[in-house]
Amino acid sequence: MRILKMDSKYLKEFLESLRMFGKLYGPIWKRDVLTHDHVENVDDLVLDGEHTLIPVKKLFHPKRFNTMRFNEEGFTPNYSMFEKRVLIGAHPCDIHSLLRLDEVFLTDPADPYYKGLRENTAIIGFSCLPTENSLCRSTGTDIVESGFDLFFVDLEDIYLVWVGSSLGHDMILEKEEFFDENVTHADIQKYIQWREMRNDMFKKSFNFRDMPDIMELSYNSEIWDYFAEKCLSCGSCTMVCPTCNCYTLTDVFDVTNKTEGRRERVWDSCMFVDYSLVAGPHNFRGKRADRLKLWYTHKLKAFGGEYGRPACIGCGRCVDTCPVDINVLTIAEAFTSCEVPAK
Ligand code: SF4
Ligand code: SF4
């Protein structure tokens, strides 16, 4: 893989030049919330490593959208959201989360909506620093080797720039004069020191490697009941988790013509009580303990069994978000120590 360097003074102009490859998206402040959205002014981009609450999945697996229009004759898929986009500021864990979602949505038969959004979006990654609850060093997702077109590591006066695709190469060619092939020993030293400094900043960790076995062995543990008593079934953990991808479909009929309408797709959560409700009525996971067990065994074990890598990418959002302190850290700690946490 080609690695170049760029003087930091060129960053803004380079990012501006990316508009020729698509509409710019990235983390910006909107009504006091940091969110991934359309970027009108590159000065608005937040590239200092702060994390958004809602992960980057929302740009590829939208929270709510119309999948099609239908009538008695048939249906017309809605692909109007496809446009050329350049996503700037994806962190390593964001890129890992997209690679996990690819496994789900691009495995044959591919989801046409996710596929269209993904194929039309260039990924410009940026390095970040750990937050209070970052766990990506435990999950091995603090660095990324693929899944981006360009990846920038911020070394203050310079950026080291990894070129990950032919599209990334074309982006560089447009502003070739900004980039230097000559990465010196001093630059490499600076990069190594930055990596060490970053590694030292992680405050929390968990035993990720052993979690698949621990989850398997603990399937019938009464510790699940302890967490179930606390869980509010609010679904916040699933909404903020970058690899959660469940959705539900609803047919919405036109008010004026009841034979026509649209099919909406909306994020769903396996933590909701009616998620597994089927005709009968039967509910396969009517108990909170069963829903928690499903989520954590899927996140930390089952997804890995199917796709080769566990679904948790260590972003720490479940730690930030759960109002009653149920998250990968408290779950890992309880099941590793085999002790019900003290109340
Ligand atoms: S389980 Fe928690 S830490 Fe892991 S990816 Fe999901 S929200 Fe992030
Ligand atoms: S584990 Fe926490 S965030 Fe998730 S549904 Fe239960 S209370 Fe809500």
Image (cartoon, rainbow, N blue to C red):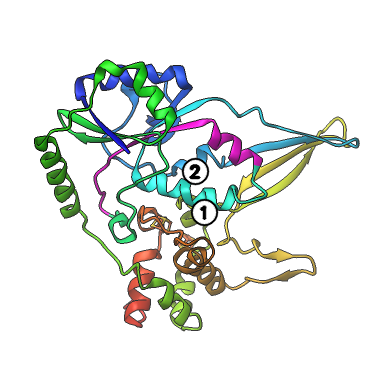
Quadrant the C terminus occupies: bottom left
Residue 231 rendering spot, x and y as whole percentages? 48, 67
Along the viewing direction, whichever of 318 and 190 lies nearer the viewer:
190
Residue 24 rendering spot, x and y as whole percentages? 44, 24
Within the image, what quadrant is residue 5 found in?
top left
- Does the numbered disc 2 mark a residue whose Cβ is under 8 Å from ligand 1? no
Q: CA distance from mark 2 to mark 1?
A: 9 Å
Q: Residues within 10 Å of mark 1 (few under 14, many from 20)?
A: many
Quadrant the N terminus occupies: top left
Residue appearing at x 24%, y 45% in the figure:
129
Along the viewing direction, whichever of 276 and 84 lies nearer the viewer:
84
- Does the numbered disc 1 mark a residue whose Cβ is under 8 Å from ligand 1? yes
Residue 116 part of the magenta-drawn span: yes
Disc 2 to disc 1: CB gap under 8 Å? yes
Closer to the chain start, of discs 2 and 1, is 2
Q: Residues within 10 Å of mark 2 (few under 14, many from 20)?
A: many
Along the viewing direction, whichever of 225 and 270 lies nearer the viewer:
270
Residue appearing at x 39%, y 44% in the figure:
146
Which residue corresponds to mark 2? 57
Residue appearing at x 54%, y 69% in the figure:
294
- From this view, report whether residue 5 is shown above or below residue 282: above
Which residue corresponds to mark 1? 244
Residue 296 in sight from this viewpoint: yes
Within the image, what quadrant is residue 28 found in?
top left
Amino acid type shown at disc 1: Cys
Residue 178 rendering spot, x and y as whole percentages? 25, 19
- From this view, report whether residue 157 is shown above or below residue 58: above
Amino acid type shown at disc 2: Lys
- Residue range (magenta): 112-132
Badge 2 element: helix
Residue 41 in sight from this viewpoint: no
